[in-house]
Amino acid sequence: MWSNFYVQKEEEGRAGGAGAAQAGALGGMKGFRGQRRTNKMSDSQEGKIKLAFFVSIVGVTLTVLGMGTEFWVELAQPKTFSGNQTCQMAHYGLWKGCIRTLWVSDIDPERTSCGPADLPGESNCTYFKFFTSGENAVIFKKTTNRNLNLTAAVLALLSLTMMVMGSICIVMSLSKAVPFFLKPASFCFFLSGVLVLLSVLIFHQSVLALLSSDHSVPLHHELSWSVACVGSAGAILIFGGFLFLLLTLPFSPWQKCWPHKNSAT
């Protein structure tokens, strides 16, 4: 009789232990699921991410517009340099350059140099041979610096790559409804903005190197609207990366800096 009693108690203990283990496992799974639910982003956070992504897309659009055009710099001869009714000017970007022949009568009388480039005239555009045969370009007897031009173009392409990677991270974050990809996106957009600004600085150095290569032809130079687009895009991309970084913080910086005052006070 006592042996049967002990066997029964042992079986009940085993059954109780198994039930407790099963309950613990179920509780752990529920806790894990609850933790996964808390990691999901709210609707307000998703709206903020979309707004920051819109700001970054504006920067991406301006970068593509500036990189695809050849109005980074304008080089203009004096309008009386050739001694006839026409004068020449040049404008180029990262990939190609154009030589324009304008009528002196169409130029503003108060302007001493040929231009601007939007005046009607004949244009001859050619792509640079930096990327194919490695040859330097000659513009008005002045020779470009191949290394500086290639560096500016490579930095611009790297910035586009980082923009694409950042956009992919934001799309994945919105589709999965998790803020995990915001930090990589912030890094990508911030780095792309820095690379864009570095590309503009190096391009300006290449223009100065071009002007100093030969002094027989006086030229007036000025950075054009493509550089303005790219420079603005770099600042916007850095600002967008900073916004994504703020969204990854576990608290609201606005509430930390300006906490809500108690109604009683």
Image (cartoon, grey):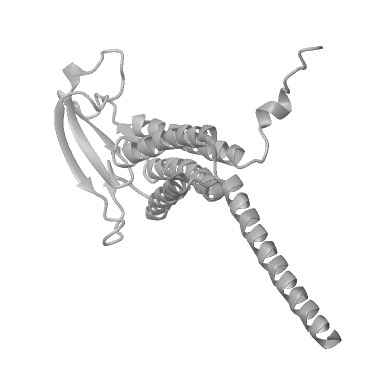
Residue 216 visible in the snapshot: no
In the shown orientation, is residue 75 left or right of residue 1?
left
In the shown orientation, is residue 1 left or right of residue 222?
right
In the shown orientation, is residue 92 left or right of residue 84?
right
Q: Is residue 157 above or below residue 76?
A: below
User: Residue 31: horizontal and vertical position, in percent?
Assistant: 65, 54
User: Residue 58: horizontal and vertical position, in percent?
Assistant: 40, 33
Residue depicted at 66% across the width and 27% down the height: 254
Residue 256 visible in the snapshot: yes
Total labels drawn = 0
Q: Which of 135 and 151 lies nearest the eye of the viewer?
A: 151
Furthest residue in direction front, as rendered: 1
**Picture quadrant of residue 32:** bottom right
In the shown orientation, is residue 72 left or right of residue 129?
right
User: Residue 100: horizontal and vertical position, in percent?
Assistant: 20, 33
Check the picture and name the quadrant holding the N terminus: bottom right
**Picture quadrant of residue 22:** bottom right
Q: Which of 30 and 208 lies nearest the eye of the viewer?
A: 30
Residue depicted at 31% across the width and 56% down the height: 130
